[in-house]
């Protein structure tokens, strides 16, 4: 519906203007329908109750229906305003001028002497892959210069001429740089990075103004947040520099397309990807086969995106955002978090798609703390701006030999659950509105009948998100959020992006670190102590060696027998819990507090004065978290996997030949000493090792030979 307004929007955040009274046929129709419904609603509302239960029910239902229709009309008006906003912004982006033209920069490396090129590549490989420092590389490059000098001089002397260098030789020698930064720039290996200023307080980002090279950033943050007012935090330190206090490095999509995807010759592959399918059978082997991608419509809203007119390529990207500690996870106590915004081009076949050189790292979100919920929007805004241009207008890449018109869409957002909810604008997974697919509330989480789950829709989601964004006060925002569990996300500016269908939890977190770990630990009861060493109560504690463990156990026992509960407080909880469990002072698998544990032990001892206190066996390795070993392999409460099976599993892990891309799990799997397992470990244990072990146990005839449990399959088969 094309509606006309009394004003045109100038920014994306302008609230809707009034409808023009004499705008268009659609305006006239809009007013007449609205007037008709309002009039009928008024009449129904003014009617006296009829006293007839059935009739009154119907009257109320009619009023509700009228309200629904009026809300629908409001929504249509809001949508028409959004179209106006897009039109106004597109005209600013000069969309009518056709695609954005991006010239590929020809690599200067091609013009270098081959031997010099080899030297530069050696230096950059040492730097990038072997982590050789700048200072050490200076030594390598200087030595190289000496070697080449010597070679020239030797050749000159042996051919009878003077041993000093010719002018041409001196010139070549001068070409060898002594700094790795010069090497990287000569090889064009550094991507063009745009340094946005990031507000240290509210995370608002500011693009450097190329017209003002002396002060490219505003002095203070200009971000206005509802009724909280302007942020005003200084962006640039007042020490005379132009560099902002905190930067957000951003790598432009267009530059990546030109310098990486085009240069590496992958565009043809991307174009042909749309022709390939995994066949007619309903069998999806890859995300590329997904109906959501195949049936996805192009910018005109009619033609499938898979249809690429002559000379054009249609790309589909997935977006991944996550945070990590740049100093590694081992640094106890220090929590520092920086984020990565990565895009993967799904047109590429799976074996190329996830190679580091083909992944587009769009930005690095600065730390030290993660941006709060909606503050993340500031960091994805530059990307969304570029995605809008490439969707509506396209990007034209050309050089002397070829030309490509590229259009691209960002479809799946793939993250772990917390990052996913934050990026897409949903409430947390533990909130009242916990689901990103349906409208079930937390107290209905046990409803497993899928047919009764009310689905979310993009239109409703967008409406709630926009109301939240346009709210005038923080209180209003909070009220709206509590009601719907939705905040604004910049991704909603992409006209095709549907948060209810395109927000996905990644397989690594969901399956390997989620389901598989849960199943092994909580369902099958393998006691895998894989909490990070720096988490929980063990923070800052030194591990006790087996000898120390024995001493602490004996100390605890003597305190109990001498009835000194206060002194027991100095003993770590693990020892008390193990003694209490072993002697039956508390039920197994209960998790009491330390004080309750001490209380239970004293209680038990008072009632069983003559009893000797049994001491649990010590652990073979140093630990901060002493616990009771139940049997040789520490299989806890459920005993689904017995010790024979675990023993068999460990044997299989040790004896299996694995391809290099599968990570071998620890050979002592199931022992607390191997520490935190990685996603790859869980994957191999559950999809390879356990399968082999189960097979062995199910078909023992293929297994045993001679005494004991060790198998000899080849002789069985032979
Ligand atoms: Zn700010
Ligand atoms: Zn749901």
Image (cartoon, helix red, strand yellow):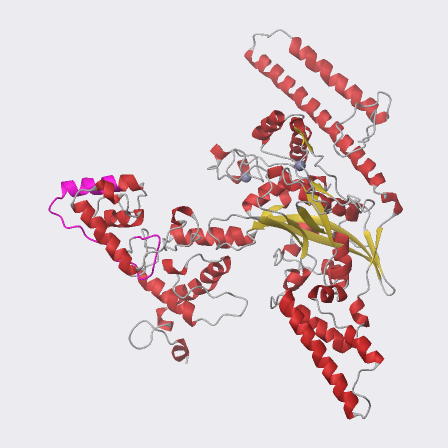
Q: Nearer the viewer, residue 22 or 151?
A: 151
Q: Nearer the viewer, residue 70 or 183?
A: 183
Q: Residue at x 21, y 46 (%)?
A: 584
- Where, quadrant-wise, is the C terminus in this rendering? bottom left
Is residue 292 magenta-colored? no
Is residue 609 magenta-colored? yes
Report the predominant secondary structure element of the magenta stretch: loop
How far across and how far down the image is residue 434, in percent? 53, 37
Image-based side of 166 in relation to 615, left or right: right
Residue 706 sits above or below residue 351 on the image: below
Per the rendered image, the range of residues in magenta is 598-627
Q: Residue at x 35, y 58 (%)?
A: 641
- Where, quadrant-wise, is the N terminus in this rendering? top right
In the figure, residue 417 lies in which quadrant?
A: top right
In the figure, residue 6 lies in which quadrant?
A: top right
How far across and how far down the image is residue 695, in percent? 41, 66
How far across and how far down the image is residue 689, in percent? 44, 65
Q: Nearer the viewer, residue 245 or 718?
A: 245
């Amino acid at each position: 519906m094309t509606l006309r307004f009394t004003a045109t929007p100038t920014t994306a955040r302008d609230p809707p203007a009034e409808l023009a009274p004499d705008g268009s046929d659609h305006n006239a129709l809009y007013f007449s329908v609205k007037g008709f419904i309002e009039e009928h609603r008024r009449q129904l509302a003014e009617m006296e109750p009829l006293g007839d239960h059935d009739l009154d029910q119907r009257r109320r239902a009619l009023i509700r229906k009228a309200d629904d229709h009026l809300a629908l009309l409001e929504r249509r008006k809001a949508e028409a305003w959004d179209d106006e906003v897009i039109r106004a912004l597109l005209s600013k982006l000069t969309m009518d001028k056709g695609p954005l033209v991006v010239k590929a920069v020809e690599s200067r490396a091609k013009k270098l002497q081959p031997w010099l090129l080899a030297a530069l590549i050696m230096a950059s490989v040492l730097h990038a892959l072997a982590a050789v420092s700048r200072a050490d590389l200076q030594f390598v490059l200087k030595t190289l210069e000496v070697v080449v000098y010597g070679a020239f001089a030797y050749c000159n002397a042996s051919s009878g001429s003077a041993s000093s260098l010719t002018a041409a030789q001196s010139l070549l020698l001068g070409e060898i740089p002594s700094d790795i930064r010069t090497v990287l720039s000569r090889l064009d290996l550094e991507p063009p990075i745009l340094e946005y200023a990031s507000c240290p307080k509210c995370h608002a980002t500011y693009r450097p103004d190329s017209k003002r090279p002396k002060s490219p950033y505003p002095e203070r943050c200009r971000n206005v947040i509802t009724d909280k007012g302007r942020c005003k935090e200084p962006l640039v330190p007042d020490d005379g520099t132009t560099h902002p206090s905190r930067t957000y490095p951003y790598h432009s999509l267009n530059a990546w397309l030109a310098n990486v995807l085009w240069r590496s010759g992958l565009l043809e592959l991307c174009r042909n990807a749309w022709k390939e399918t995994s066949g007619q059978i309903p069998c999806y082997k890859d995300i590329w086969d997904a109906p959501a991608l195949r049936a996805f419509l192009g910018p005109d809203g009619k033609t499938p995106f898979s249809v690429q007119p002559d000379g054009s390529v249609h790309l589909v990207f997935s977006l991944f955002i996550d945070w990590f500690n740049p100093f590694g996870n081992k640094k106890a106590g220090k929590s520092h978090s920086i984020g990565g915004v990565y895009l993967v081009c799904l047109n590429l076949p799976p074996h190329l798609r996830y190679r580091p050189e083909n992944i587009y790292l769009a930005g690095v979100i600065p730390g030290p703390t993660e941006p709060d919920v909606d503050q993340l929007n500031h960091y994805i805004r530059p990307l969304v701006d570029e995605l809008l241009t490439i969707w509506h207008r396209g990007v034209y890449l050309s050089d002397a030999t070829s030309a490509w018109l590229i259009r691209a869409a960002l479809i799946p957002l793939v993250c772990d659950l917390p990052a996913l909810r934050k990026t897409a604008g949903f409430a947390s997974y533990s909130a009242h509105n916990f689901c990103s697919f349906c409208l079930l509330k937390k107290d209905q989480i046990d409803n497993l009948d899928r047919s009764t789950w009310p689905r979310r829709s993009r239109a409703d989601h967008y409406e709630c998100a926009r109301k939240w964004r346009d709210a005038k006060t923080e209180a209003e925002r909070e009220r709206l959020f509590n009601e719907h569990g939705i905040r604004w996300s910049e991704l909603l500016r992409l006209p095709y992006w549907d948060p209810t269908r395109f927000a996905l939890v990644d397989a690594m977190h969901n399956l390997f670190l989620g389901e598989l770990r849960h199943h092994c630990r909580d369902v099958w009861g393998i006691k895998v102590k894989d909490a990070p060493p720096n988490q929980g109560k063990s923070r800052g504690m030194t591990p006790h060696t087996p000898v120390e463990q024995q001493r602490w156990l004996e100390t605890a026992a003597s305190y109990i027998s001498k009835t000194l509960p206060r002194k027991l407080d100095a003993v770590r909880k693990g020892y008390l819990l193990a003694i209490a469990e072993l002697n039956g002072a508390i039920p197994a698998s209960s998790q009491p507090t330390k004080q309750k544990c001490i209380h239970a032990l004293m209680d038990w001892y008072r009632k069983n004065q003559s009893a000797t206190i049994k001491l649990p066996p010590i652990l073979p390795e140093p630990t901060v978290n002493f616990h009771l070993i139940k049997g040789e392999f520490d299989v806890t409460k459920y005993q689904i996997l017995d010790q024979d099976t675990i023993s068999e599993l460990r044997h299989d892990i040790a004896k299996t030949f694995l391809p290099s891309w599968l990570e071998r799990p620890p050979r002592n799997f199931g022992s607390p000493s191997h520490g935190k397992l990685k996603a790859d470990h869980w994957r191999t244990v559950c999809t390879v090792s356990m399968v082999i072990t189960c097979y062995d146990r199910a078909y023992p005839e293929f297994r045993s030979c001679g005494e004991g449990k060790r198998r000899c399959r080849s002789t069985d088969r032979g």
